[in-house]
Amino acid sequence: MHTVPQPQPQAQPKAFRCTIYDEPATLGKVDEVLYVFYDDGRVVTFEVPMAPWTTILGEVGLLEAARLADRRHGGAAAICTSRQMEVA
């Protein structure tokens, strides 16, 4: 008798609309690191000194969170051309 491993559910990317230093942005967690995606295109790592000036406005949808994760990894073209081959 052989036990079949059950697939582990992957954590869905989550992102939240927020304001940081009175600038609109999206706060997202990618690969266990918090990033701030500003509306003007800047991407910076969220740091503790930013917390007092951060206001969370609400969660963004799954599609927007996935788009931000893709943007952090270099975009769709970079993801498609750098995928590692899985060998059993």
Image (tube, rainbow, N blue to C red):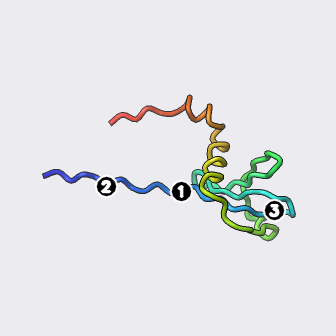
Give the number of marks: 3
Residue carrying label 1: 12
Is 88 or 76 nearer to us in this picture? 76
Residue 39, given in percent of the width and then of the height, sits at 80, 51
Q: Determine which of the numbered discs, if any, sits on residue 20 in the image.
A: 3
The amino acid type found where label 3 is placed reads Ile
Q: Where 51 sits versus 85, above or below?
A: below
| Residue contact between numbered discs 1 and 3, judged by CB atoms under 8 Å | no
| Residue contact between numbered discs 2 and 1, judged by CB atoms under 8 Å | no
Residue 77, given in percent of the width and then of the height, sits at 62, 31
Q: Determine which of the numbered discs, if any, sits on residue 48 in the image.
A: none
6 with respect to 52 (left or right): left
37 with respect to 6 (left or right): right
Q: Quadrant of residue 54?
A: bottom right
Residue carrying label 2: 6
The residue drawn where x is 48% and y is 33% is 84
The residue drawn where x is 74% and y is 68% is 57
Q: Residues within 10 Å of mark 1 (few under 14, many from 20)?
A: few
Q: Quadrant of residue 81?
A: top right
Tell me how far mark 2 sits from mark 1, CA to CA: 18 Å
The amino acid type found where label 2 is placed reads Gln
Residue 66, given in percent of the width and then of the height, sits at 60, 49
Q: Residue furthest right?
A: 22
**SS for tag 2?**
loop
**Sequence-wise first label, 2 or 3:** 2
Which of the two marks, 1 or 3, is nearer to us in this view?
A: 1
The residue drawn where x is 62% and y is 43% is 70
The residue drawn where x is 81% and y is 62% is 20
**Sequence-wise first label, 2 or 1:** 2
